[in-house]
Structures are given as C-alpha cells and as structure tokens.
Image (tube, rainbow, N blue to C red):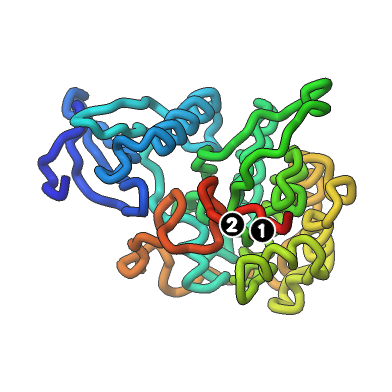
Amino acid sequence: MSKSRDFLGRYRLARLIRIGSTAEVWEAIDENSSDNKRYALKVLRESCSADKAEIGLLKHEYNVGKALSSPRIIKMIDLQTDKGRPFLVLELFSELNMKQALRKGPESLAFMLKKIIEQAAEGLYYMHTKNWIHRDIKPDNYLVARDGETKLIDFTIAEPKLTGIKKLFYKSKTVQGTRSYMAPEQIRGKLCDERSDVYSFGCVLFELTTGKPPYTGQTPNDLLSKHLSGSIPSPIVYNDNVTPEFATLIKKMMAKKQEDRPDSVWEFLKEFRAMEIWRKRPRAPEVSVFDDMGSMKSADDMIKRPDGNYDVVKGGDKDKNKEAGE
C-alpha cells in the first residue's frame, strides 16, 4: 500500500501519516463522497492483519470510541476489513500529538497551554461520565491543533468503570499501560478508577510544563518503583515559571494513594480554572512547532505502542508481573 492510488474499500490512501509496529495511519479520501471528504484510517499492518489479538484490540477500540461523542474526543466512524486488512475509519484531525510537540521543548505549547489542558481534561472527564477508564493517558494520546484545540485518542486498553458488587469480584488482569504514566494501583494490577487516570494526567501536566516526564529509570523496574514509592517531584524544580498553586495541584494528582488525589477530573477542572499556570505568561515561539514537523514522522510517533519502547507494558510481555512490581 505504498502507492497513493491504492484503495481500502471506498477510501483512496492519499498519504501515510505514521507507521508503527502493528498499525499504519493514513490520510484517506472517500471517493464515494461528492466533496472527496478526508478521513484518517488506522490500518493493521500485513504482519498483524490475521493476528486475533490485534484484531480484538482494534475491535475493542472501535466499540469504546463509537459510544463517545464529544468535540474533545476523536470521532470513531467505522470498522471495516478490505483485502484482508482490518482498519478503523476516524475523523481526520491534527497529526501532531503532545509528545511530538514537546520534542521541540515545553515552550512549543506553553503560550496556549491553558486551553490545551482544559480541553484535554474535558475529553477525559467526558469519557469518565460514560463509565470508561482510559488507562493509557499520556502525551502521545492527545492530538493538538495549531489553535490549541485538543482531542483524546486511542482507547485500546480502556476498561468499563466497575461499581457496586462488581468491584468486590474484580480480579487482577494482565498489567497494561505506559510505564512513565502508570498509577501505582495500575502497576500492581489492581482495580483502576477515575483517580488512576487523574494520576496519569498529572504526569502529563508535569511533562507539559517541564518538557520531561516526572520519573525516569535505568531499567523498567527502576522506573516503576519510582511510581510506587519515589518522592513526588515538583515541576518548579525544572521550570521556575510554574506557579506554586499549579505545582501543588500536579503533586496532588500524583499522590501514591487514590484517596489523596482529586476524586474526579471535574474536581481538577474546578481548581484549574481558578488558577494560573505561569508566573509570567509565555510568548508564542517565532517558529511554530506546526510549521516544523518534517523530522517528527517516525515509528516512535505512532498512535499505538511504538516498537522497541520499554516504556509500554504489553499484555504479552514475558516478565510483565516482575516489571510491574508484583
């Protein structure tokens, strides 16, 4: 599918946006539409197109996404198979995610960060109101447009929120997530709720204000142990332009115990809207990150699970329990 005139169903593949270990993301044109409307297609690679586990993940992502209807969440349109290749049809939005932008430094988004964070939180809060826990909140899973509009993506490992008696019968499942952003209870394979996503979102906010995740490690175990028992860093240590109020809120979101965090994203939003992020408001950079994207399209930028990245805990990881600190 390297030729621009290739088709999947009625969609002409116009441009390869990104490629990852299991999937490709294409900009595609609906040739049956009168206005040649454009979409994003997330297509399983040929090597994975018959893999039942990968097909199952794609179907799960579709089933979660089609139940969500918010301007803060990427719109899921269809799930199809053509030429033996399963693919998702999604709304075509900005191809730049937070992680890519942060590679140019936190100043690339700092001037419009209030809008970005508010919209990112609104998308997550909406998902929670529909009784879904995302479980993989990270900069890679937020797309950002030139004007700061932000949308949440990738529901591959999302789980329904358990309430009542179902919580009592919860059994630990395969540990999944991204190590740099996983809440302690997620690392331990315990029940996740809204506060687990709040923890991960706190890690994202730390990175948005400093340009680096809150914890790093020499090994996967080292990284996970810091989430479990390491002291909670302050973003002010790395960026003294962050206000003390916002730094305190981020640290509260990253509390080790669920009960010490904000109870919901809505509680976060109420506090956030009443405070400032910066001591001194940043200016927009002379060269926009949206005008300097030539070096950003690589396998590491793929929406789902980049190849060779030990930061991602896969269901099939050989030593997943050991790596997750169990």
Q: Is residue 75 visible?
A: no
Work out whether residue 176 or residue 198 is closer to the camera in this orientation and state it: 176
- Residue 52 makes an appearance in the image: yes
Helix, strand, or loop for circle 1? helix
Q: Quadrant of the N terminus?
A: top left
Crowding at mark 2 (Cα within 10 Å: few <14, some 14-19, many 20+): few
Locate residue 78: give its quadrant.
top left
Name the one closer to the observer, 299 or 264.
299
Q: CA distance from mark 1 to mark 2?
A: 5 Å
Specify the label residue 300 is tagged with. none
Image quadrant holding the C terminus, namely bottom right
- Residue 79: image location, x then y, percent: 36, 26
Residue at left offset 82%, top offset 21%: 165
User: How dense is the environment of label 1, judged by Cα within 10 Å: few (below 14), some, or many (20 and up)?
Assistant: few
Q: Mark 1 is on which residue type?
A: Lys
> How many numbered marks appear?
2
Q: Which residue is mark 2?
A: 319
With 12 as the anchor, is 38 left or right in this view? right
Q: Are marks 1 and 2 in contact (CB under 8 Å)?
A: yes
Residue 282 drawn at (x, y percent): 61, 71
Find residue 155 and report its horizontal and vertical position in percent. 53, 38
Height in image: 291 above or below 55?
Answer: below
Residue at position x 82%, y 49% in the image: 271
- Horizontal and vertical percent position of residue 170: 75, 30
Residue drawn 75% across and 38% down? 191
Asked if residue 217 lies left or right of residue 263, the reply is: left
Please tell me whether residue 243 is drawn above or below residue 62 in the rendered image: below
Q: Is residue 117 above or below residue 218?
A: above
Pointer 1: what residue?
322
> In percent of the image, x 81 and y 65: which residue is there?
229
